[in-house]
Image (tube, coloured by chain):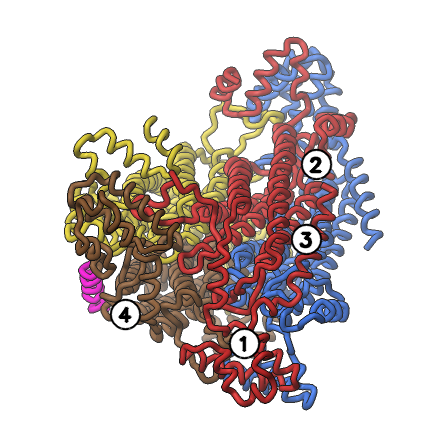
Chain colours: A blue, B red, C yellow, D brown
Amino acid sequence: MERVKEIEAEIHHDLMAVVKALTEQCGEAGKYIHLGATSYDIIDTANALQFRDGLAIVRRDLFEIEGILLDLAEEHKRTVAVGRTHGQHAVPITYGLKFALWATEVRRHIERIDEAKKRICLGKMTGAVGTQASFGKTGPRIQRLVMKDLGLKPAPLSNQVVPRDVYAELISILAMIAATFDKIGKEFRNLMRTEIMEISEPFAEKKQVGSSTMPHKRNPINAENICGLARVVKSNIFIALENVSLEHERDLTNSSAERALIPETFILTDEILKRAKKILGGIVLYPENIRRNLEMTGGMEMAESVMMALTRKGMGRQEAHELLRRASVKAFNQGVPLGEVLKGDKEVTALLTEKEIDRALDPAAYIGTAVRQVTAAVRSIREKRKRG
Amino acid sequence: MERVKEIEAEIHHDLMAVVKALTEQCGEAGKYIHLGATSYDIIDTANALQFRDGLAIVRRDLFEIEGILLDLAEEHKRTVAVGRTHGQHAVPITYGLKFALWATEVRRHIERIDEAKKRICLGKMTGAVGTQASFGKTGPRIQRLVMKDLGLKPAPLSNQVVPRDVYAELISILAMIAATFDKIGKEFRNLMRTEIMEISEPFAEKKQVGSSTMPHKRNPINAENICGLARVVKSNIFIALENVSLEHERDLTNSSAERALIPETFILTDEILKRAKKILGGIVLYPENIRRNLEMTGGMEMAESVMMALTRKGMGRQEAHELLRRASVKAFNQGVPLGEVLKGDKEVTALLTEKEIDRALDPAAYIGTAVRQVTAAVRSIREKRKRG
Amino acid sequence: MERVKEIEAEIHHDLMAVVKALTEQCGEAGKYIHLGATSYDIIDTANALQFRDGLAIVRRDLFEIEGILLDLAEEHKRTVAVGRTHGQHAVPITYGLKFALWATEVRRHIERIDEAKKRICLGKMTGAVGTQASFGKTGPRIQRLVMKDLGLKPAPLSNQVVPRDVYAELISILAMIAATFDKIGKEFRNLMRTEIMEISEPFAEKKQVGSSTMPHKRNPINAENICGLARVVKSNIFIALENVSLEHERDLTNSSAERALIPETFILTDEILKRAKKILGGIVLYPENIRRNLEMTGGMEMAESVMMALTRKGMGRQEAHELLRRASVKAFNQGVPLGEVLKGDKEVTALLTEKEIDRALDPAAYIGTAVRQVTAAVRSIREKRKRG
Amino acid sequence: MERVKEIEAEIHHDLMAVVKALTEQCGEAGKYIHLGATSYDIIDTANALQFRDGLAIVRRDLFEIEGILLDLAEEHKRTVAVGRTHGQHAVPITYGLKFALWATEVRRHIERIDEAKKRICLGKMTGAVGTQASFGKTGPRIQRLVMKDLGLKPAPLSNQVVPRDVYAELISILAMIAATFDKIGKEFRNLMRTEIMEISEPFAEKKQVGSSTMPHKRNPINAENICGLARVVKSNIFIALENVSLEHERDLTNSSAERALIPETFILTDEILKRAKKILGGIVLYPENIRRNLEMTGGMEMAESVMMALTRKGMGRQEAHELLRRASVKAFNQGVPLGEVLKGDKEVTALLTEKEIDRALDPAAYIGTAVRQVTAAVRSIREKRKRG
């Protein structure tokens, strides 16, 4: 390595410096070093090895996270909580559905990697412009032997480099993964809000300092870190897409860009996944806060449930919708529970008994097929996981 | 439609306006319109139909372009031209290799679409937060029947919407396609340069005005148009990645963004592919210019070939490399052909006869396995094309 | 216009079609139409006019929004609310500070426009490559007269086009504006959360439908719309940055890209600002919710205040910090107000009386220099607003 | 520093670790360390110092490059070359105009920095949420003294952090600078093409290896490096724009992102400028190649000149345009010089003598006001440079 650096300082070409240093070491056989090869036969093939190993790490992390999510989904299959759309309370969900939904998204990323791997991990031994002219007729055999040795497949065709659409696909998958964990990180940050506090990152009570001046805080620092790093990973897709347009049999513009692009994207994705594993693996749920939030609006998030109950009794959908809208506005303005307003509404009581109203207002009775859906989704993914 | 717009102006909600208008038209049955459904059951399912049809058009265009490229690759299998790396003349290539390489890239895009389609074209009928609460127990059956009717698959799980990683995958594939055609467009622009002029877009000589003040020009306007539109398509991946991070059971931020994102990305990708089909389908090659460029440097691009010939005669790789470097610099500085310098060099003539030097300097004899590689690649893709 | 379209269909060149149509109309003088000019003399100069007018609209909207924010800042100078960092309750702020802070950011955007305008609104009359060769010696005079007529300045130098760094600066300013209103939109969305509900977009109670199935909801649809559109505007900066790299005296790649870029960016920025004006102009504050949130953690957000009180009595900063950290953890775990824990802590009572503890726990007494800072900032901006 | 790392490992908070370590060192006075301050008072103020120094370096580099360009512009004021639009030969330009045009673009970047600096280099001492509550009444004085000491201005208002629109402006300026040098790098790469070879990067003939297998090449490696790094810098604007949207009084997402964003953007911009200085400072022009290219099309790039000459003699613009278009097509198809075709055309010879045709076809006589424009632009910039 020392000698390589000395030579590079002299000749300004990194790979040729390696070649010269190896040649010096190999005595007689030195003349066969790099014979017929071009720098990018080595670099792109080495990249393919890195991609294979890097993707294996990413996949392993995703697989572990998926396992955690499936366990959480089953454990919280019936943990009813308020659903939120537009940041507003909506009809109930279960935490099981939330976790299982994330698991299906993680599963899609695993599938993306599994399917794309064959296109991404491609080596080459085709010389300066892809013709293998410097290898002569033995070119295909040399390429076949080198790839066999390294456990790679060669690009179907290449010029001086493996075409960079392949690299763009790699980075776009990592960017999509970053986007998913940006979402999960954001969900942690929102559900950890002081006013909501339904879940928490694991937090070492004794020593960890949440804030230098506000010692009571439980800051979602891992989740925030994930969201911040996801921005960097996502921004890198631009570099990868620009690198596709190399000119003719290749220009060198990808070289400097990839020195930042490849390690940064892999390392930061890895960091994102490590932190995600940590916060999902150690997630704390606060059942009393989940219940408190569920009951916060005095049943208004159950308006849809009552609307459906009314339509089952024969009221038109539009009519029921308008009735509930008015009742909700009234409950909101007067600050009383929706149930109270409904029980005092003749149109409602003409169709529903008090008990039916109460039942329609019970969140736990209004989670539809969530349990069944989660069970089926978890089973389906567990089935796929058996194949590794 | 008129009535829908009237209602929307009143209530500020597009889908509810459709529901109201349909309800008005359907008399007694009106009360079942949209019953239990949420707006995004309709919108995301409709999106899935659009994605399916849009991707079919993109795939069909890619398939046609691939066909054109395969024909070109075979036709020009032996059309030897100078290869270029760093914009500089390098060892020879064939136009067949160039076209076949693009075909393998287009083939990868087709594979990406074929593999991703099952993840992208997903409908949903799961109500406001994904639980199907408003459908009751019949939820799964309703979703199954609707999807069957439309020829779609449902998302494994959903909340108010189909998770947007799915949309990010769609846009990232279209962005990668745009990047490939940006490259092809750039290659046209560079090879159509006045100084190079090896190929040309088809050009209607009589009427089309290339420039308002320079009537002699043959501007690569389709290729430039492709490169410009590719910038727009590529930039859209950022919107799609941001949209992944919807909060909780969904926020509405994706809505306004997707109104620009989805039609723009599909329409501009379509325009890119249409123009690509046009310029590849009507490409003109200028053999005399290809030959002129090949001979431009007086054989210096054949230095590698001579170097390999010398090593075959026993000279060390480093030694041969250094010898050729010096000879090339000399030829360049004196403005004489490389062959002349070599024939006057004792180290060379000690190992190679004049005839051997001439042969080493013949570009057509130095395209390695290009023909064989192209033949194999074309055959392999044609085989895949049989499956549609 | 009809005639222009007819001609364009025939010759495939939009500007030449205009020239031909005008020439047909102008009889004898027709021969001077477009004489010596190149298409982009007209297009870029027309763009400059659009930028001037478009920026004037953007600036006017920003100016109005700034005015609204200054009024809000003054009105709520003393509206104490809980501050939030990491989504967690922190020490108190005032709504006045929040609004005034946004005003300073809007002011910076106005300054950016005012300073950049001279670089952005640049016309040109320099012909096909910037030399004015086709105008002859009268070139500079022609350019001067045209610019004077239109109220523009010419680019210091140009080639076929005005250099596109100028356009990148325009789009980057609009992207930064979009980013600011993305922040403000997000703040609305978060502060409108059911659990927080400190503020609200104006909401027409009677007719507007918040959700097709959950009639009680008050969805932040304008804020969500702003955040969605901001993604589109922000993504466009990439197009603008790519367009800078036109080759030689210009290539045409910017043309197709700018047909999407320029109108989309201006129109969507305009829509963002219009909606921002609406929600800021009609913002509703809910004082009781603001107070409720402020008191939610039982005084824990006042830990810093107590810490400072202790240090003023001589306790070391580290010691006080650690003391408060422990007290907060205790209060949090036992679910009691921090004041209660502190009043039972001998280290505290050794230094502070009960009254001093209460005072240290009063949020209204712990807003530091917020009022003074806001007053000064508002005054400073109002001063600048006098100049228009 | 050792002690800081020990403490950080224990408490997971970098800045608090510094505070603790300093406190340990300061004995009695230790209790005043960081008193009332929040981490980001320190970090953002330190960032402002880095921005100030970083921008000074960038500005100094731009200033030097501008100086080089002005010298080149003057030296090559009359170096006539073929202009190129769409990659096609157009009417003549001068290299002086090309260099001077870049100088005006660099000048705009210097102006952007000079104007934006006051908005970018902003410190803060306002505590956890911007109210200075922990500083008490002395807050404004503390901020004033700290800023005075450091030679900074404070942000007009801040919350926990300096608003990130300020950072977005910084990165957008650096991204625009990167875009300009991407253009200049691309121009080098194109003008260094083997077929064009009008200019070259400086190249150390003896030792530097251009390619490991093609020793004759003169690769534009610095220019390619610039273009590659520009992609990375440009992509970072996305991170900076996302960071603007911090929630409430601040969330932590910017933190991890900025650890990549800030050093990477500055370091790579610096590298871009260093390499730009190198290739512009050592640029080699090849006059014989410039002349050869100018004459390549047999005068067809002079069609406009002849057209203008004909209109001066009374022919209508449209008529002249059409005449030249036909003549050029004829010359192109027959491979003869345009002058020959024109001299054989009766419509032309009716208005122009052979001498007048020759003069109209002389590139050096058709550079319009290029010299005058360059002289004026150079003078104007030199005037501004006197102010530093």
| Percent coordinates x, y for residue A298 in the rendering | 63, 29
> Which mark is in front, 3 or 2?
3
Is C90 positioned to the left or the right of A153 in the image?
left
User: Helix, strand or loop at disc 1?
Assistant: helix
Q: Which residue is mark 4?
A: D72
Q: Which residue is outermost to the top? A: B27
Cα gap from disc 4 to disc 2, whole angstroms? 70 Å
Q: Chain of mark 4?
A: D
Kind of residue at badge 1: Ala
Q: Which residue is mark 3?
A: B378
User: Which labelled disc corresponds to residue B303?
Assistant: 1
Cα gap from disc 1 to disc 2, whole angstroms? 71 Å
Is residue A195 among the parts visible in the rendering? no
Cα gap from disc 1 to disc 4, whole angstroms? 35 Å
Give the extent of the magenta segment.
Answer: D371-388
User: Helix, strand or loop at disc 3?
Assistant: helix
Check the image and report above or below for D80 versus A85. Answer: below
| Percent coordinates x, y for residue C205 in the rendering | 49, 23
Kind of residue at badge 3: Val
Cα gap from disc 3 to disc 2, whole angstroms? 53 Å
Q: Chain of mark 3?
A: B
Foreground residue among B313 and C123: B313
Q: Earlier in the sequence, mark 1 or mark 3?
A: 1
Is C287 positioned to the left or the right of B146 in the image?
left
Q: Quadrant of residue B254?
A: top right
Q: Chain of mark 1?
A: B
User: Which labelled disc corresponds to residue A93?
Assistant: 2
